[in-house]
């Protein structure tokens, strides 16, 4: 079994999100001996730019055209990320909330990997996901509290976005742990972090957060 851990925070060992994710991964490795965990730290890798040339290549290929040698090379660099993503059995996304949504590096990654013909295809009936039967875990932390019933809930564009975009790729089995609020007061942060860590262990053991 192969798990891809996608890191979308630049805060390394200071990251609350990663503290929770590390607990999840430790328990996951106990549950699945031999599990291969590959880490993609989006703040460390240089992702290909979604440039004019790359977007042109996409449309040229969609209309059945062919690419120049350079465009073909650049396009293959982009496609590598998409096919690599597809090669995993399941995923863990570690992402803080940034401005009600995801950090820009994660959006950049999504703009790279969401390629027609790899993660989804167009059919006469619409779009069909090609990454079906794969599971995703998302661990997020937020400064404020966006839980259901809370006034801020309406501004959570993080969980609905991640569910929608990976749902389009066919990944509909997505479990979230949203640790929140994390920036109100140190004692509240500590309690919410501890609860999320407990949830993360349970999510690894049971496949679901408690
Ligand atoms: C650039 C930036 C934008 C942020 N935007 C929000 C936001 O919109 N809503 C919120 O509740 N917290 C926001 N936060 C707070 C973080 O989500 C929160 O502190 C989180 O726990 C940080 O996770 P980390 O320690 O794993 O990096 C923001 C933080 C940063 C650095």
Image (cartoon, rainbow, N blue to C red):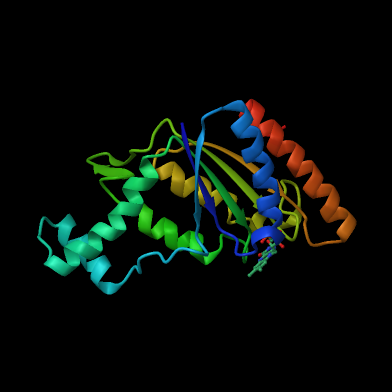
**Residue 53 pos. (x, y %):** 24, 71
Residue farthest to the right, as pictured: 187
**Residue 83 pos. (x, y %):** 32, 46
Question: Could you tell me which quadrant the C terminus lies in?
Answer: top right
Query: Front-most of 167 and 1?
Result: 1
Residue farthest to the front, as pictured: 34
Task: Name the residue at 50% across, 64% down.
Answer: 44
**Left or right of 163 on screen, residue 152:** right
Q: How many marks?
A: 0
Say if 103 sits above or below 194 in the image: below
Query: Front-most of 40 and 163?
Result: 40
On the question of residue 114 being in view, the answer is: no
Residue farthest to the bottom, as pictured: 52
Q: Residue 8 sits in which quadrant?
A: bottom right
**Residue 82 pos. (x, y %):** 34, 50
**Residue 155 pos. (x, y %):** 64, 59
Say if 189 sits above or below 163 in the image: below
Q: Quadrant of ligand 1?
A: bottom right
Query: Front-most of 188 and 42?
Result: 42
On the question of residue 131 being in view, the answer is: yes
Task: Name the residue at 39% across, 33% down.
Answer: 132
Task: Name the residue at 58% across, 49% down.
Answer: 159
Q: Residue 186 sits in which quadrant?
A: bottom right
């Amino acid at each position: 079994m192969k798990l891809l851990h996608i890191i979308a925070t630049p805060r390394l060992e200071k990251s609350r999100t990663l503290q929770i994710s590390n607990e999840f991964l430790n328990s996951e490795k106990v549950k699945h001996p031999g599990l291969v965990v590959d880490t993609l730290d989006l703040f460390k890798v240089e992702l290909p730019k979604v440039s004019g040339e790359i977007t042109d290549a996409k449309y040229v290929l969609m209309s059945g055209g062919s690419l120049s040698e350079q465009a073909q090379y650049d396009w293959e660099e982009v496609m590598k990320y998409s096919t690599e993503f597809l090669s995993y059995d399941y995923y863990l996304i570690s992402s803080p909330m940034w401005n009600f949504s995801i950090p820009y590096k994660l959006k950049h990654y999504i703009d790279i990997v969401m390629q027609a013909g790899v993660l989804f295809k167009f059919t006469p009936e619409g779009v069909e996901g090609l990454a079906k039967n794969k599971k995703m875990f998302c661990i997020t932390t937020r400064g404020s509290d966006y839980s259901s019933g809370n006034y801020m809930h309406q501004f959570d564009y993080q969980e609905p976005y991640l569910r929608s975009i990976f749902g389009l790729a066919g990944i509909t089995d997505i479990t979230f742990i949203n640790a929140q609020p994390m920036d109100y007061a140190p004692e509240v942060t500590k309690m919410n972090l501890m609860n999320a860590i407990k949830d993360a262990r349970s999510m690894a053991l049971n496949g679901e957060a408690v």
